Amino acid sequence: MGSSSNRSYSTSSRSSVSGMSNISSNNHDAVSDRNMEFIWWLANRLTSYDEDMHKEILEDFFTDDAKYVHPALTVEGRYNIRKVFRVWTSLNKDEPEVTNIVFDGHTAIISLVQNLRPRVFPLLHLQVPATTTLHFKDTPEGPMIYSHQDSWTLEGIVQSMPLIGWWYDHVARNVLGSVLTSAGGFLHTANQTTGYLQFRAEEVTRMSNSIIEQSSQEIQLRSREMTAKAQLMVDQAKDTMEKRVASARDEVERMRQLMRPTPAKAITANDVV
């Protein structure tokens, strides 16, 4: 597609998009077909290797301080984003392919496939799944992009390499799955054993506390019984001792009377009268 036709389409799109009032923080409804048409157009032009089109998209739909975040770098400002784009298109030959877009009026999540074909090694071709996230904000000129983030997953990079991707899918994942399954089974068994041991320990503790409490009660009861018996024996001994002392006193008094009788009184004339 020529740059002149792209520019004319860009001008008409800007005029139609400038009136999009439903890209606002208060709009939570479904995005209209008009907006989806716009975001698809924007995504395809943004990923295009046409430098003039890319420049026009940056000038029309990016803020001056827009930030571009890539897994390998971060730059700020439209001019710096253009320089990064120029370096990338100089090193890589094929454009990416947009596969899907989700757009809620504020954020666009673009799924695409990066075709990595270095210009110095054109026979090497890797297709890496990637995601581009565009964040919009409202400005007097209309909705503008203030953040452009590219994300490449490690899984996508590994799977894009023929031999490494096969080895990753059929060997590494299976081995790691088996290891994690075995580890999960071991941890499950260990957790069950630990739980059972903890339960038994708590049960033993409860039984020990019960035995200690019961023993303490029995000891206290026996102690009270022995104290009562001892007190009874003391009382009985005391009573017996008192009886013996009283008996001894009576015996002493009897013997005293026996050994020392009271003398008879003399009879006088007055007693006779």
Image: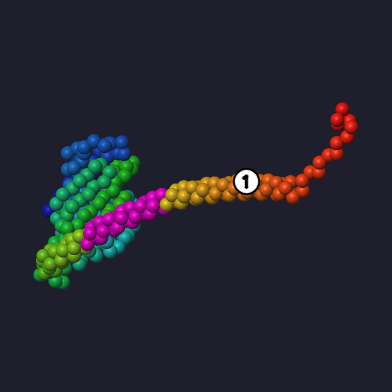
In which quadrant of the rendered view does residue 74 lie? bottom left
In which quadrant of the rendered view does residue 173 lie? bottom left
Question: Residue 130's x, y, as percent?
Answer: 19, 57
Q: Is residue 128 above or below residue 263?
A: below
Pick whichever, 200 or 121, lies toward us.
200
Residue 87 colored in magenta in the image = no
Colouring convention used in this rendered image of the protein: rainbow
Q: Which residue is mark 1?
A: 243
| Label 1 Cα neighbours within 10 Å, binned few <14 / some 14-19 / many ≥20 | few
Disc 1 element: helix
Characterize the magenta stretch by its predominant secondary structure. helix
Q: Is residue 120 above or below residue 273?
A: below
User: Could you tell me the amino acid type at mark 1?
Assistant: Lys
- Please tell me which residue is depicted at 52% across the width and 46% down the height of the picture: 228
Inspect this view and state whether residue 102 appears: yes
Question: Residue 263's x, y, as percent?
Answer: 81, 43
Question: Residue 83's x, y, as percent?
Answer: 28, 62
Pick whichever, 269 or 244, lies toward us.
269
- Please tell me which residue is depicted at 59% across the width and 48% down the height of the picture: 240
Pick whichever, 220 or 212, lies toward us.
220
Instruction: Give the residues drawn in magenta, as a range.
Output: 186-214
Residue 211 colored in magenta in the image = yes
- Please tell me which residue is depicted at 79% across the width and 43% down the height of the picture: 262
Residue that sits furthest to the top in the current view: 273
